[in-house]
């Protein structure tokens, strides 16, 4: 347990940041799941719309440090190629 006032404050800050990051990570996963479901349905228009909605969420999470920027780029790239393949 934290003993000094500064350590107690740090513990409070960490708890707040953890809650925010957990919420952001959950939001990103929801958007990714929607894209996956759209791809599974086989409808290129719905999949493209879902990807267009998910892309800024992933980039925002990367800019906030919730996910690594390379991870976000990789996920966007792989989803985009799958959506593109769906239309062909």
Image: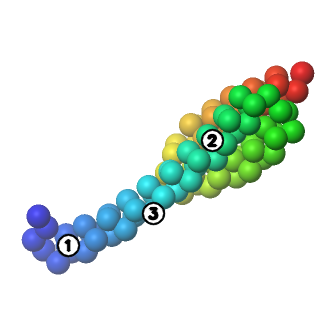
- 75 vs 6: above or below: above
* Residue mark closest to the camera, 3 vs 2: 2
Tell me the residue at 75%/26% (across/down): 82
- 15 vs 27: above or below: below
Tell me the residue at 25%/74% (across/down): 9
Q: Is residue 35 left or right of residue 5?
A: right
The answer for how far apart the CA atoms under marks 2 and 1 are is 36 Å
Question: Is residue 85 in view?
Answer: yes
- Residue count near mark 2 (Cα–Cα under 10 Å), binned few <14, some 14–19, many ≥20: many
Residue 62: percent from the left, percent from the top?
A: 57, 49
- 9 vs 55: above or below: below
Q: Is residue 73 left or right of residue 49?
A: left
Considering the image in quadrants, where does the C terminus appear? top right
SS assignment at label 2: helix
Which residue in the structure is indicated by mark 1? 8
* Residue mark closest to the camera, 2 vs 1: 2
Which residue in the structure is indicated by mark 3? 20
The answer for how far apart the CA atoms under marks 3 and 2 are is 19 Å
| Circles 3, 2 touching at the beta carbon (< 8 Å) | no
Tell which circle, 3 or 2, labels the residue nearer the N-terminal end. Answer: 3
Which residue in the structure is indicated by mark 2? 32
The answer for how far apart the CA atoms under marks 1 and 3 are is 19 Å
Q: Quadrant of residue 63?
A: bottom right
Tell which circle, 1 or 3, labels the residue nearer the N-terminal end. Answer: 1
């Amino acid at each position: 347990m934290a003993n000094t006032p500064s350590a107690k404050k740090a513990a409070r800050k960490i708890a707040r940041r953890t809650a925010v990051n957990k919420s952001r990570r959950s939001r990103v996963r929801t958007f990714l799941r929607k894209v996956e479901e759209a791809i599974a349905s086989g409808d290129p228009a719905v999949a493209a719309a879902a990807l267009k909605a998910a892309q800024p969420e992933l980039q925002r999470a990367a800019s906030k440090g919730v996910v690594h920027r390379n991870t976000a780029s990789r996920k966007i790239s792989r989803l985009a190629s799958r959506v593109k393949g769906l239309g062909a």
